[in-house]
Amino acid sequence: MNNSNPLLFAQDLTFALFIRGPVEATTSFFYGMMPEYASAGSKPSHCDEQCADSPTCPSLTRVLAESVWLQKTFRGKTGSRNYKVYIPTSYGREPLPMIVMLHGANQDPDDFAAGTRMNILAEEARYIVVYPEQPQSANAARCWNWFRPGDQIRESGETALIAELTREVMSTYNADSTRIYVAGMSAGGAMAVNLAVTYPDLYAAAGIHSGLPYGIANDAFSAMSVMNYGSTDPQYALLQKKLGQRAYAPLIAFHGDQDNVVHPRNGDELMRMNRIFALSSQSTPCQVTTVESEADGIYGHTRSLTCDEEGEVVGEQWIIHGLDHAWSGGDSGGSYTDCNGPDASREMLRFFDSISLNTGGDREVSA
């Protein structure tokens, strides 16, 4: 908590009230005043007993061995954070791709790993997965502070901290520097966007679930406004010029059209931002849209691919019909999940598999 700054202190409490409700916010508020903070408790999942037994929603029953699911602490120039890292059991010091997973409000690494099933998929696909943890001492609702100007720029605040943490884990486990990805849910998704925009030389691509565009809020109050209603004509071209950006991070983004926490309009705005950042003003992009109806208990969805003039995908949007604020295709063992949606985690890995950076800092995209 920012109890040393009265304005930020009030904003943190207000934001926590908005995200968590009065009872939980008051509890987290007082925890935030203490040196130690509580772990996130059980939060809503949209899988019922029948869904938990469904083959489309596998249960997280395997207990990960301590040797591959490690608790660590990072201490860097801009701060410190606890984090967890998953290493595939087949790992032998060879360079592997790596995903940085940023949890949402009220979550922690264990909860987020269980809900997304990313560790299970990473075992199959041979990815290292890193889960930085946001403490209540930094935000009463355990949100990444994506909306603060100091956390939206390179070499500053939480963007710099996560980038530093990423590089340390890359070095420790000899990760493939051309295949580093970032993904997140809600506030974690918004922070993943910040990182994709400010560190396109580090992250080859980003996976965003229920997130928001870059630079559309500058404090907790404006963050609540855009979460409720979406942004009001943000000037992405001006933001791009201000950043001096020459590269981009391709995005795959998921959003439920019934999301009552982060308005679905934000998903559309995120992809509009991506097109502006990824393509020149002279480009004639191609967009291909497919619609799938609900089938076998799985929500229908609209999937749109945006390609540049050479046919390379620069953005992929999934609108999940009937999904609210939950990770699509997630496991009921974690919070804010709905197993009735298409598998967002598997689709993110599929997208990441097609994109890498080369040693010159450019990215290579395969079909």
Image (cartoon, rainbow, N blue to C red):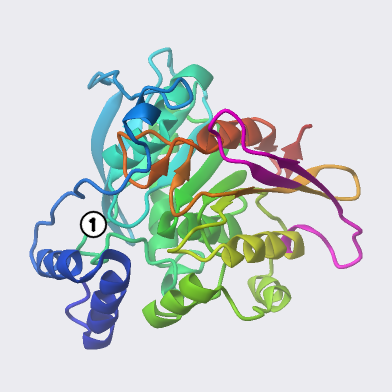
Instruction: Give x and y (percent) for residue 122.
Output: 46, 25
Q: Nearer the viewer, residue 254 or 48?
A: 48
In this image, 281 relative to 189: left or right? right
Q: Residues within 10 Å of mark 1 (few under 14, many from 20)?
A: many
Q: Quadrant of residue 296?
A: top right
Residue at x 71%, y 74% (from the top left corner): 241
Answer above or below: position of 276 versus 331. below
Q: Quadrant of the C terminus?
A: top right
Number of numbered tags placed on the structure image: 1
Q: Which residues are magenta?
A: 277-304
In this image, 338 relative to 202: left or right? left
Q: Quadrant of the N terminus?
A: bottom left
Residue 45 in view: yes
| SS under mark 1 | loop
Q: Quadrant of residue 358?
A: top right
Answer above or below: position of 27 versus 125. below
Q: Which residue in the protein does label 1 denote? A: 135
Residue at x 47%, y 24% (from the top left corner): 121
Residue at x 22%, y 22% (from the top left corner): 66
Three-letter code, disc 1: Pro
